[in-house]
Image (cartoon, grey):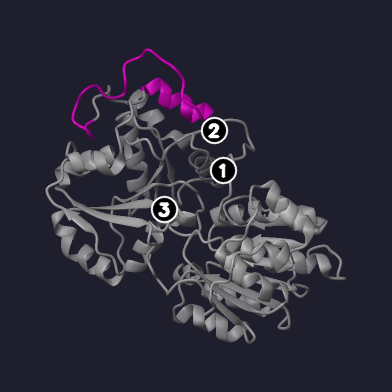
Amino acid sequence: MSDLQPTRTFASLGVPAPIVSALAAGGITAPFPIQAITLTDSLAGRDLLGRGKTGSGKTIAFAIPLVTALAKSDERTRQGSPRGLVLVPTRELANQVAATIAPLAKAMGLRHTVIYGGVGFGNQTAALKSGVDIVIACPGRLEDLIGQGHCRLDRVQVTVLDEADHMADMGFLPGVKRIMDRTPSDGQRLLFSATLDNDVKVLIDRYLHSPVNHALDPVDSPVEAMTHHQVETSMGDKLAVVTRLAAGPDRSLLFTRTKHGAKKLVQQLGKSGIPAVELHGNLSQNARERNLADFSSGQVKVLVATDIAARGIHVDDVRLVVHVDPPAEHKAFLHRSGRTARAGAEGLVVTVVTPEQRKDVRSMTRAAGIKPIVTEAVHGKHPLLESLAGPAQPPRTIAQITHIAQHGRPRQTHQQPARSGGAAGRPQGRPGAAAGRPAGVGARPAGPAGRRRQQSGQRAH
């Protein structure tokens, strides 16, 4: 395990000047610790295993050596034969990694593309045919394109496995192995993972050659700036408790166990005057990207997600994570919770527990090394909820929620609010399509196509 180095600059670590300038243009002027301790080795071409807390800046830590190595190479771009490969577990992570790599690749005259399922093949095959230097891909779709003869990996010089433990958890390990077997054995391999279990060790032993190991924290360590609360409530009061937690002024991420549960909760929050978007596997890729962009930009403050968002979704300033449905095991609990307290910021995690879940949640938090502050008999108007979530924001009207769905921003209106003085979590709007339709804010296009999420200050990528 490496010791933390004194504060250094990207230039002093050997990062090329055009990349330093591209980082600075994005507000990133000094390396995060994971970048500072890994770049010397990765820029020297060594295989590397990097571990650190979620939000520690691992994307830039591998993007810099990837782009630098390809820019220095004498090899040239060829049709269907990328020279750099980044494997990721989810579409959302693929897009976010691409957004980080894009300005660095452009600064060095390189081209990249993103490959994942859920969308047509046309744009992806066209990009490969035109010739790209870097492919950021999910394993399943990449194997499809290889099988169709659109992509070869025999010229890959640098391979990155990002969120390797999550790919193993999702059952992608056989596909990852088949893909890695197609890359040259003498290429550089960089593996980044928050945890290091047996499945990840198989990848390390098989594909990394004498890797240098850099780790900032013990495996599965909780973030120090994260405060954990456990609120125990009855099933009858649960929706009111969750609704009050979502009503605060800050950006919050609510996790449910199922896709149906996520969609239903978004509708229930909407009827209570709280605009929310959903993120789960039943959405089209365009809807997933649109909803994540609206949440990332702050146009919508509440994201309701299944575990698809528990890993690899990099959104800054998420102050509150709520486990509406506690996960089944402690690793998922830690990964979900890691969406807050990113890049040194403080964060709050609240687990909502019903009596029948109490025993399982106690075992799970113990396995995670967490000792939450437990409060029993919590109801929708319990004073604890305001101290956790902050003051409740004025409820939006049906017209405002609909306007946010269509345009991504609220508007002024004199109509009655979506809820009117009833108990939290008990919608009182008129029934039927008019009341339910706008609740799922992400159900139809929001704003112009291609809208980019706003960037502000230095972020951990």
Q: Which mark is residue 445?
A: 2
Label 2: which secondary element: loop
Above or below, 328 relative to 260: below
Q: Which mark is residue 340?
A: 3
Task: Identify the residue shown where x is 48% and y is 41%.
Answer: 295
The numbered mark, 1 or 3, whose residue comes first in the sequence reads 1
Disc 1 from disc 2: Cα separation: 9 Å
Q: Which residues are magenta?
A: 397-426
Occupied quadrant, residue 396: top left
- Direction top: furthest residue: 414
Question: Is residue 36 placed above or below 207 in the rendered structure?
Answer: above
Callout 2: few (<14), some (14-19), or many (20+) C-alpha neighbours within 10 Å?
some
* Magenta span includes 418: yes
Magenta: main secondary structure equals: loop
Q: Residue at (50%, 41%) from the top-left corner?
A: 291
As for residue 425 lying within the magenta part, the answer is yes
3D distance between C-alphas at marks 1 and 3: 25 Å
Q: Examine the rendered structure and indicate whether residue 33 appears above or below residue 244.
A: below
Residue 20 at what x, y percent from top left?
Answer: 73, 56
The label on residue 74 is: none
Q: Residue lying at the far front in this picture: please name it.
A: 6
Of residues 35 and 240, the one drawn nearer to the viewer in this rendering: 35
How packed is label 3: few (under 14 Cα within 10 Å), some, or many (20 or more)?
Answer: many
Q: Which numbered marker is on residue 286?
A: 1
Tell me whether the residue at label 1 lies in contact with that at label 3, contact meaning CB atoms closer than 8 angstroms: no
In the displayed structure image, the side of residue 242 where residue 440 appears, left or right? right
The CA span between labels 2 and 3 is: 27 Å
Q: Amino acid at mark 3?
A: Thr
**Is the residue marked by circle 1 packed among few (<14), some (14-19), or many (20+) residues within 10 Å?**
some
Camera-nearest residue between 398 and 294: 294
Quick one: label 1 or label 2, which is nearer the N terminus? 1
